[in-house]
Amino acid sequence: MTYVPWFLPYQPPSAFRSEPACEDARLACRLLDRMLRDPLLRHEHICIEVQNRVVILEGVVSSVEVRAHAHECAWDTPGVHDVNNQLHASQR
């Protein structure tokens, strides 16, 4: 199981720049990189977990549109077999 907290600064720490050892870690880092580059997602608090090429998204996001966009971004990541979207939109 690979767990990547989304609570990172705008640039990921150097630990994420080296090649991860397992496929789940590579998928998590690939998705993290995509979300950091996405203007709609980069400021959201999303936790990414990958287990057997299944992405699990957890956290609270600003809207249902952002929740759907994060789901699509995860599905569009090469190598992902399934997405379990447990994100919740805040009640602002």
Image (tube, helix red, strand yellow):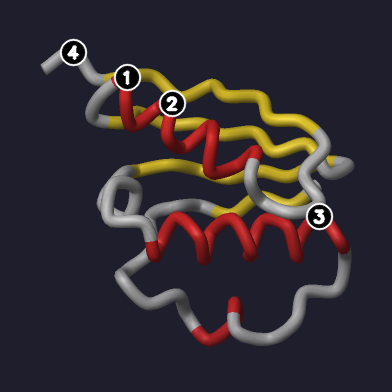
Residue 27 location, x and y as percent?
73, 57
Q: Quadrant of residue 24?
A: bottom right
At label 1, the amino acid type is Val
Dot 1: element: helix
Instruction: Give the mark nearer the N terminus: 4 vs 3.
Output: 3
Instruction: Give the mark nearer the N terminus: 3 vs 2.
Output: 3
Contact, mark 4 vs mark 1 (Cβ under 8 Å): no
Q: How far separated are the C-alphas under marks 1 and 2?
A: 6 Å
Residue at horizontal 54 percent and vertical 21 percent from the top = 86
At label 3, the amino acid type is Asp
Split into 4 quadrants, where in the image is the C terminus?
A: top left
**Residue that carries the numbered disc 4 in the rendered image:** 91
**Residue that carries the numbered disc 3 in the rendered image:** 24
Side of 34 where 2 appears, left or right: right
Contact, mark 4 vs mark 3 (Cβ under 8 Å): no
Dot 4: element: loop
Residue 70 location, x and y as percent?
46, 37
Dot 3: element: helix
Contact, mark 2 vs mark 4 (Cβ under 8 Å): no
Instruction: Give the mark nearer the N terminus: 2 vs 4.
Output: 2
Side of 13 where 18 appears, left or right: right
**Residue that carries the numbered disc 2 in the rendered image:** 68
Q: How far separated are the C-alphas under marks 4 and 1?
A: 10 Å
Dot 2: element: helix
Q: Which mark is residue 64?
A: 1
